[in-house]
Amino acid sequence: MILIKNANLISMEEINYEICDILLEDNKIVKIGKINEADYPNAKIIDAEGRFVTPGLVDPHCHVGLMESTIGWAGSDVNEATTPITPELRGIDGVKPHDECFKEALESGVTTVCCGPGSANLIGGTFCALKTKGKTVDEMILVKELAMKMALGENPKRVYGNSKTSPQTRMASAALIREWLFKAKNYYEKKKAAEGDKTKLPEFNMKLESLSRVFDGLPVKIHAHQADDIATAMRIGKEFGLKMTVDHCTEGYLIADSLKANDQMVILGPVMHNKSKYELKEKSFSSGKVLYEKGVTFSIMTDHPVIEQKHTLVQLALFVKEGLNELDALKAVTINAAKLNHIDDRVGSIKVGKDADIVIWSKHPLD
């Protein structure tokens, strides 16, 4: 049992910027408020001495462990760039838990990461959710298969266009995603109609077996930067009834009214890096303020290693500098990041019953 006393609590729930105590037991939060330490004589006491205390940070979209630091080719397992449709892949099978960046993330207050395949493929496989502490992937798992990754825009065009195979255009990218979603829906409906009768089941297909889960509620992450690609993502999502986020959404602030009208949730970023390609030309730290003011639900990602997770709060501070409210910025890397990945029952805020992922900061988090 651990009792944190005198925390300047930023819970991301009802209690924010108030001095409180927090009681932890069996890796869970069991009590918040004014707690008499005499009632818990066996508890380890940690006096926060008025320091800011927040939930552990959550990175809603990254590739930590799949693009291992310093290793180069041998440590890069983020893109199976051999065919554009690979829904059967699982990010969890490529994660290297001894990547030094997990340690750096933990030391920087990032306790949960949502990581998975990159954006070379139109349908790339599944993301997982991991804690950043642990010696094996199995120790770190929060959710084995969190979401199905899809991608639009320049990356699939470049990877497969250069090899003279499809897709070479945005039209082909959208068409191939739709084709495989139609196939997966048909496969799903046949399985459902079989009602367990093996003689009526469709012939097993590993790609369709994996992809068809999006019709059972498996979330989808669609990589899209430009406004036109974002609009295409929303059309596809609406057509197939996908539970999805638009990830990156670099130009989303330019069409924020459309995002709001479609109740489209967004995972924004990264912004703190160079404009490495044309579709990043409109990236701006003011995007956070615009999305917030338009009422769009969003979180903020690092896309590690594009921005290393140890710089999560540096990027966040620059969003605040451009007008995003401080508390809402912090929510974008805690509770909102958890909600958009459907893991907010475990992490993202300091609330009774949730995991005891708690950070005591030596200074203000955005100092």
Image (tube, rainbow, N blue to C red):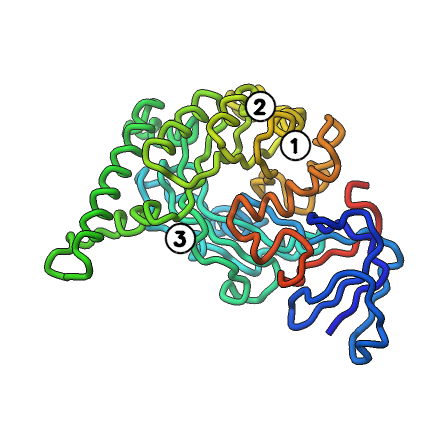
**Between 58 and 298, the one nearer to me in the picture:** 298
Is residue 71 visible in the rendered structure shown here? no
Q: Residue lying at the far left in this picture: please name it.
A: 199
The picture places residue 274, in percent across and down from the top left corner, at: 62, 27
Q: Position of residue 237 (x, y in %)?
A: 38, 33
* Residue 9 in sight from this viewpoint: yes
Q: Which residue is mark 3?
A: 90
In the rendered structure, which amino acid carries the disc numbered 3?
Arg
Above or below, 229 against 94 in this view is above
Residue on which disc 1 sits = 272
| Residue neighbourhood size for the residue with mark 3, other residues' Cα within 10 Å, grouped as few (<14), some (14–19), many (≥20) | many
Q: Along the polypeptide, which appears first: circle 3 or circle 2?
A: 3
Q: Earlier in the sequence, mark 1 or mark 3?
A: 3
Image side of residue 196 versus residue 210, left or right: left
Q: Residue at x 71, y 68 (%)?
A: 24
Give the CA separation, mark 1 to mark 2: 16 Å
Residue 233's place in the image compared with 192, above or below, is: above
- Amino acid type, callout 1: Met
Q: Could you tell me which residue is drawn at 59 percent across and 40 percent down?
A: 301
Q: Is residue 164 left or right of residue 296?
A: left
Residue ID at (21%, 51%): 205
Q: Quadrant of the C terminus?
A: top right
Say few, some or many: other residues with alpha carbon within 10 Å of mark 1 (under 14 / 14 to 19 / 20 or more). Answer: some
Q: Position of residue 51 (x, y in %)?
A: 85, 53
Residue 107: image quadrant is: bottom right
Residue carrying label 2: 253
- Earlier residue among tags 1 and 2: 2
